[in-house]
Image (cartoon, rainbow, N blue to C red):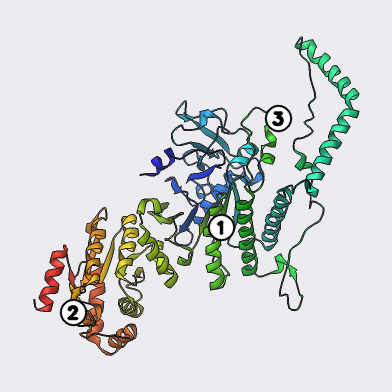
Amino acid sequence: MDELENIKNVVISETDRPSLKTLIVKNFRGIGSSPVTIDLDKIVVLVGPNNAGKSSILKAYQLVMSEGSGDADLQMEDFPNGVVSEEAIPEIELHTVVFDNAPGERWIDKETHVVRERWQWHAPGKPKRQGFDVTLNDWAESGVPWGAPNVANAYRPKPHRVGAFSDPKLQADAIIKLLTDVIKERVKAVQECGDQKSDYQRLIESIIQMRAQVMEQSNEEIETVEKQVSDLVNEVFPGYIVKFDARVEEDVDKDINLFGKMNAQLLMGPGTDGHLSTIDRQGSGARRTLLWSALRIIAESASTQKVEPKRTGKKTGKNESSAESNLPSFSRPHVLLLDEPELCLHPNAIREACRVLYDLPNTGNWQVMVTTHSPAFIDVSRDNTTIVRVERLNGEVAGTTVFRPSRVQFDDDDRTNLKLLNIFDPYVAEFFFGGRSIIVEGDTEYTAFKHVMALKPAEYKDVHIIRARGKATIVSLIKILNHFGSSYAVLHDSDTLTTSTRFGKEMKNPAWAQNSKIFDAVKAHPGNAKVKLFASITNFEKAYFGQEVESEKPYNAVMQLNNRSETFRTIESLLEALLNDTDPPQGAVKYDSIDELQKFVSEYMGG
């Protein structure tokens, strides 16, 4: 089922919150007239070379969410080549999935529940925002979804941007703000216990009572003002009156600022000697680790409080400009925009940061978009991750969705295989970053090819050897590479049709059965002519080293390559055959059917 059908069949619930679906950017900074389209998911990982435009994509969303403030103003350097041209105006388009009528019915696609908005800058400064009117099937010249920017921003996911080299003071302030909000929300969420009310609830009630008392005492003065205003209005609109409604029970929270004058600080340091200092004086790694901790607490707060936003789509007689106050901080949706989370972190901290980021959207309240140069931040075993490769093609920035779980169609075995592989080799996902890919079965092939590549780095600098660590995982990796639609090569052991048990009896070899699965997976490639499929007869060591090796296979491979120039040339020839259209060395076969592979093996075995 495609993405459109998935959206059509969504069951709408009052508890569902808006979520980002698509971001389209063009003519912004290094991004040119060819639009960069980002398919958004719970987790979006942007990969690609330096200076390819990844950070500009994060900035684009933050920019449109800052409408109504100076932060949404573009400078001249944000325009293509620093020149304002009506032929190339900066434009950002955002598609948001909604589950109520708060934006207004004219803006909501009835089938997909998507609201489309776009921002254009015809000159440095503020943007022009437009909504796509589904009744006109065109961009509207008047009116916008949700209304004013502050109202609209209260319903779209709120951005939290963390740059790669953010100012330490700004990072510290952001962390304090996050944790302060958590404390505020937890205080507000304290429930009544029997007849006992919380201090916060009693405070709220006291303010409401005080408001009502003031209104009662001021009733005569209020009525006098109402009559004076009504008399003046009545001269122009006969029969009209004016009434003052104080709404004493609404927005009480705004009158309470629990930490407004406290000038809160966070201190951090080793507890053994008691030397603690402010966050802005900590190292980059410590500040980022503290950020993960804050985000983790936020995620837990969102999942336990279950606070639902008040809807302002109904007629309340209330000024819409207060819409944002109706959405508690952790009941409204959020999106984390994070540049290179691996920076300044110890390997253990990188693994923890990756786990936190992938778990954050599980609360249903968050989406995450990160840029990274680290394969350790890609976990293909998860079902909530979209991977987008951002690169420059023919001088233009392009964003290509290279992985989306809903399109790859993993089964449970695939997820288990990939999860285990990710534990053993956190850098297995390096092929997502571009280059030529070769899937190999085990450590020996991986070590042998890496040895050749290390001695000739210029020739093989863009080659990724993907170590599957088993035949079953080869199938799972093929499914991912098929999703790319790009070229790749596979090398596996043919094994034999039968094998001997420890009691000397012949039985079917389970490893042989995997050959058919590998072959079928390769043939599922939309253009399977791009795939080179080779088998080593009957295993790598026997095919190219002329001997069976029972232990220390990778070490033996390196020794063979170092000590025997003929073996080195054989492995190099095999590598070339996998990458190009050269003939493979003896011991390797390229096959087009399982019957053909069986024939090669039978001939080798003398059958």
Q: Earlier in the sequence, mark 1 or mark 3?
A: 3
Name the residue tied to disc 3.
318
Tell which of 124 and 481 is nearer to you. 481
Q: Residue at x 61, y 56 (%)?
A: 300
Question: How far from the left and from the top, in percent, is residue 159?
Answer: 59, 49
In the displayed structure, 300 sits above or below 273; it is above
Which label sits on residue 338?
1
Tell me the CA gap for discs 1 and 3. Answer: 36 Å
Give the mark nearer the N terminus: 2 vs 1. Answer: 1
Task: Residue at 29% x, 60% y: name it.
Answer: 487
In the rendered structure, the answer to whether residue 234 lies left or right of residue 80 reads: right
Kindly tell me whether residue 383 is visible in this rendering.
yes
> Is residue 496 shown to the viewer in this render?
no
Residue type, label 3: Lys
Question: Which quarter of the rendering shows the C terminus?
Answer: bottom left
Residue located beneath label 2 in the image? 505
Give the mark toward the camera: 1 or 3.
Answer: 3
- Quarter in which the N terminus is drawn: top left
Q: Residues within 10 Å of mark 2 (few under 14, many from 20)?
A: few
Q: Tell me the element at label 2.
A: loop
Marks 2/1 in contact by CB < 8 Å: the verdict is: no
Residue 180 higher or lower than 581, as above or below: above
Image quadrant assignment for residue 588: bottom left
